[in-house]
Image: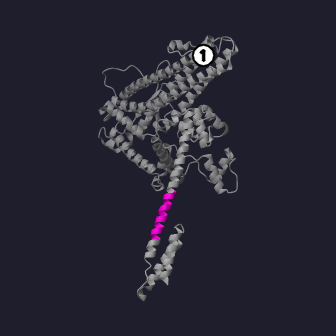
């Protein structure tokens, strides 16, 4: 409950923390409004582009009043509108990625700042720079899987709004044409982005105002979600065991949140916040309210679980995590099976998540394993309950084993090294006349000569989806699910210019890899021939006719070794083998 704060009056530690939390909420709300303002500005720019695109067709004669003059004009208009909405989608995607992480980190920062503002021992000594440094430490040690999920969830919500906006614009334009409206009327029907809150309430439910409302709701709700998650992650990390639900205690408190106000929950079981779209609630530390070692009393020493960890303890945790990360990084970068094998399954799973390798088995994995345990049967059509039953029958787990992860991580590192080698090779190519300087037509012709498909193949689409949604397994997508994913991310049937360039670069890399492989094979052959020749020469040199009978046994042994070297030198020049064989025959006589 946020009320009027009394000035210059001694307060309890609990009240000091509550007041610090109120300050944190104000900072959170300010950041939220800044994010909303950025999103609104992007939408305003997109609205202006769409309006100009439609209005210019009146003067061009491509879309005159009351009738459709030319299909080509309409196609061009739709292309202009699509470009504007696609740019909006890209810009909003980048902003949501940035704000989710920033809000989460700000939540961590505010959690620390609340302890400092409440004058808790050790925390009260932190400067703003010290708080920022400690927030960075906390961010490196807390589990950020929830942050990744929230970010992807935000992008899905924003993507839905973007699709509705694009569809709404198209529908309004086509309806306007069909009913004989002029371009000014069509533009008016689209509505406008309204920045003034009072005017916005009376803007009605038109295309742009509807998109504005939904985008602002998403921004306010999801910024608050990320901020609260950051605070709770920090509280959980330092040992806060109970949190109290805290509303804004004003006329806008809703029936959902009102009854929760003041209720205390275990940190690990704290109800989801926000509880609904546009929710403004937060949490406040309820217990414990003492810092470990802060009072240096027997109770604090005897009950370490009933106190909050001081900053220095967080620093130690961060150092330990840093060492752990360095160990994992070294094992992955070596790419050696032996090094990866020294890691635990949990460590391997961490590495896999960090490097875009799914820890869960794919459907292809399941089919392969079933083919091994039931050879001769076709399992490729198994789906749903039938597949689950087979997996249960043969006790095949959903997660990849340690050996699976080691193999996939080693392959991933090999692929990364090959990509680095290719990048180094490409750096040596003069900038003039590079792929970027070619036209799409020229790139397509080159692709044909190199056997590179102009179409986005299923694997191309899956690779692109892996980049757009890291950590998500797309390998099992097919049919309708694959089409839905392509529609969601606006992936067309043909490769665009950048995709053609990347495909040609990949093909060039495969050529280089094959050349390197052949060079390695040839080098190995040469080395083997060199060793075989040296071995033959050494064996032949040891065959010396004995001067006395006592050396006869050694002579026979040397002959035997020389004959073995000749027999094993099939790859050596025939002239050399025949020459050494004749020498050996003469010595034996």
**Among the 4 quarters of the image, the one containing residue 315:** top left
- Number of marks drawn: 1
Q: Position of residue 73 (x, y in %)?
A: 65, 19
Residue 507 colored in magenta in the image: no
Task: Determine whether, in the image, residue 141 is placed left or right of residue 255.
Answer: left
Mark 1: secondary structure: helix
Q: Is residue 297 above or below residue 166?
A: below
In terms of secondary structure, what is the magenta stretch mainly? helix
Report the span colored magenta: 521-535
Q: Which residue is mark 1?
A: 54
Q: Tell me the residue at 48%/58% (across/down).
A: 523
Task: Determine whether, in the image, residue 163 is placed left or right of residue 134.
Answer: right
How many residues crowd around disc 1 within 10 Å: few (fewer than 14), some, or many (20 or more)? many
Task: Determine whether, in the image, residue 559 is placed left or right of residue 191.
Answer: left
Frontmost residue, 557 versus 9: 557
Q: Position of residue 197 (x, y in %)?
A: 50, 14
């Amino acid at each position: 409950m946020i009320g009027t704060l009394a000035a210059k009056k001694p307060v309890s530690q609990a009240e000091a923390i509550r007041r610090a939390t109120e300050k944190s909420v104000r900072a959170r709300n300010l950041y939220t409004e800044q994010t909303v303002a950025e999103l609104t500005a992007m939408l305003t720019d997109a609205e202006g582009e769409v309006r100009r695109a439609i209005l210019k067709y009146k003067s061009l004669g491509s879309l005159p009043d009351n009738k459709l003059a030319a299909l080509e004009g309409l196609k061009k208009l739709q292309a202009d509108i699509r470009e504007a909405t696609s740019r909006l989608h890209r810009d909003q995607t980048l902003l949501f990625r940035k704000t989710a992480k920033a809000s989460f980190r700000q939540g961590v920062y505010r959690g620390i700042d609340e302890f400092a503002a409440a004058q808790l021992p050790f925390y009260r000594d932190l400067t703003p720079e010290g708080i920022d440094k400690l927030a960075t430490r906390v961010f490196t040690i807390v589990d950020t899987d929830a942050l990744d999920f929230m970010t992807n969830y935000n992008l899905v919500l924003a993507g839905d709004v973007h699709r509705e906006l694009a569809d709404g614009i198209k529908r309004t334009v086509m309806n306007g044409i069909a009913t004989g409206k002029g371009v000014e009327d069509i533009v008016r029907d689209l509505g406008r982005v309204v920045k003034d809150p009072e005017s916005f309430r009376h803007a009605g439910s038109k295309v742009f105002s509807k998109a504005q409302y939904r985008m602002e709701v998403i921004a306010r709700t999801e910024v608050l979600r990320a901020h609260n998650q950051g605070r709770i992650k920090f509280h959980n990390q330092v040992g806060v065991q109970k949190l109290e639900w805290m509303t804004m205690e004003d006329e806008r408190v809703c029936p959902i949140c009102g009854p929760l106000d003041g209720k205390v929950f275990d940190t690990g079981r704290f109800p989801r916040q926000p509880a609904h779209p546009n929710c403004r609630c937060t949490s406040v530390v309820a217990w414990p309210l003492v810092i470990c070692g802060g009072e240096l009393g027997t109770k604090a020493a005897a009950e370490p679980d009933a106190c909050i960890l001081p900053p220095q303890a967080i620093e130690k945790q961060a150092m330990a995590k840093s060492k752990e990360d360095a160990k994992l990084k070294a094992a992955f970068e070596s790419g050696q099976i032996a090094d990866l094998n020294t890691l635990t399954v949990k460590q391997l799973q961490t590495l896999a998540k960090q490097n875009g390798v799914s820890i869960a088995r794919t459907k292809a994995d399941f089919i392969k394993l079933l083919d091994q345990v039931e050879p001769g049967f076709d399992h490729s059509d198994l789906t749903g309950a039938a597949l689950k039953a087979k997996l249960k029958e043969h006790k095949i787990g959903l997660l990849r084993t340690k050996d699976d992860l080691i193999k996939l991580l080693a392959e991933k590192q090999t692929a990364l090294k090959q990509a680095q080698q290719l990048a180094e090779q490409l750096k040596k190519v003069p900038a003039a006349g590079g792929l970027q300087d070619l036209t799409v037509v020229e790139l397509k012709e080159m692709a044909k000569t190199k056997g590179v498909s102009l179409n986005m193949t299923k694997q191309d689409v899956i690779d692109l989806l892996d980049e757009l949604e890291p950590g998500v397994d797309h390998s099992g997508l097919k049919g309708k699910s694959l089409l839905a994913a392509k529609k969601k991310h606006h992936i067309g049937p043909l490769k665009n210019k950048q995709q053609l360039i990347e495909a040609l670069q990949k093909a060039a890399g495969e050529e280089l890899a094959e050349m390197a492989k052949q060079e390695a094979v040839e080098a190995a052959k040469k080395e083997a021939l060199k060793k075989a020749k040296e071995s033959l020469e050494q064996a032949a040199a040891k065959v010396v006719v004995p001067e006395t009978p006592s050396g006869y046994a050694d002579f026979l042994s040397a002959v035997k070794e020389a004959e073995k070297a000749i027999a094993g030198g099939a790859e050596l020049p025939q002239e050399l083998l025949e020459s050494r064989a004749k020498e050996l025959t003469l010595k034996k006589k």
